[in-house]
């Protein structure tokens, strides 16, 4: 069992296909994990029921969209494809490897043009799959904003090329910084 990707209707037909990647879901002891965990969570976020969670509450501001329109624009997935038992649980090496394979499969199948990794726990050169630049032995590019620089690279799959940027988790990021990072990357 692994969580299904949340994908809005018509995603494949868009010129800009934006994929948001988080680290993992965590569940309380009374919740059951299931394939639609991500989809159900995003549906709750669209309905305004996840406002106490910065990961969901702040994202619509990054594209300057109303909440429901934002979630009708972007696809979302978590790198770790199952819910963890608690918020800061460290996933096993097996789960990280499963996450890498799944990440690359989603890129190949869904062909996002832009991927935003919103997690301080996922990093290029550590636990994210190697980018095309890393495989060639090159340094990653940096997306420079007025609020800092963020590493970015590309992934080439059978679906096409996806530009990927590693940003902060929304809980630790200034909205204006993330808005600028999203705008600059989407202009590429």
Image: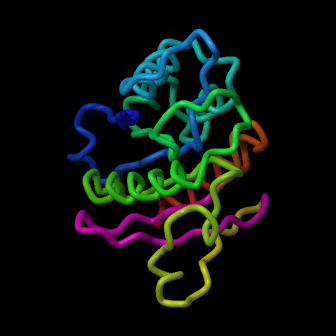
Residue 52: name its quadrant.
top right
Name the residue at 51% across, 47% down: 79
Q: Nearer the viewer, residue 129 or 69?
A: 129
Magenta residues, start to end: 147-166
Residue 121: x percent and y percent? 69, 51
Q: Is residue 8 left or right of residue 158?
A: right
Instruction: Give x and y (percent) for residue 72.
Output: 37, 30
**Residue 105 in the image: above or below residue 37:** below
Number of callouts: 0
Above or below, comparing residue 152 to residue 102 in the picture: below
Quarter of the image holding residue 176?
Answer: top right
Q: Is residue 39 magenta?
A: no
Residue in the picture at 21% in, 46% down: 13
- Whether residue 159 appears in magenta in the rendering, the answer is yes
Q: Residue furthest bottom?
A: 137
Lateral position of residue 95 relative to residue 10, left or right:
right
Q: Residue at x 78, y 58 (%)?
A: 147
Quadrant of the snapshot with the N terminus? top left
Q: How is the image coloured?
A: rainbow
Residue drawn where x is 60% and y is 17% of the image: 50
Task: Give coordinates of residue 142: x percent, y percent.
Answer: 65, 73
Residue toward you, 100 or 29: 29
Q: Is residue 78 positioned above or below 56 on the image?
A: below
Residue 87, image x and y in percent? 71, 31
Q: Answer left or right for 136 relative to 175.
A: left
Q: Main secondary structure of the magenta part?
A: strand
């Amino acid at each position: 069992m692994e969580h299904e990707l949340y994908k809005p209707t018509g995603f494949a037909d868009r010129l800009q296909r934006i994929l948001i990647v988080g680290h993992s879901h965590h569940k309380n002891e009374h919740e059951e994990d299931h394939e639609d965990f991500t989809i159900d969570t995003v549906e709750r976020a669209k309905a305004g029921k996840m406002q106490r969670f910065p990961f969901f509450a702040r994202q619509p501001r990054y594209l300057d969209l109303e909440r429901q329109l934002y979630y009708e624009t972007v696809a979302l997935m978590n790198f770790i494809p199952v819910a963890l038992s608690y918020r800061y649980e460290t996933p096993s090496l097996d789960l990280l490897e499963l996450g890498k394979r799944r990440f690359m499969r989603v890129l190949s199948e869904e062909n996002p043009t832009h991927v935003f990794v919103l997690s301080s726990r996922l990093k290029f050169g550590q636990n994210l799959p190697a980018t095309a630049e890393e495989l060639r032995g090159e340094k990653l590019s940096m997306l420079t904003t007025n609020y800092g620089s963020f590493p970015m690279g590309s992934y080439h799959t059978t679906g096409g090329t996806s530009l990927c940027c590693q940003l902060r988790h929304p809980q630790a990021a200034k909205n204006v910084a993330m808005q600028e990072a999203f705008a600059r990357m989407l202009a590429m």
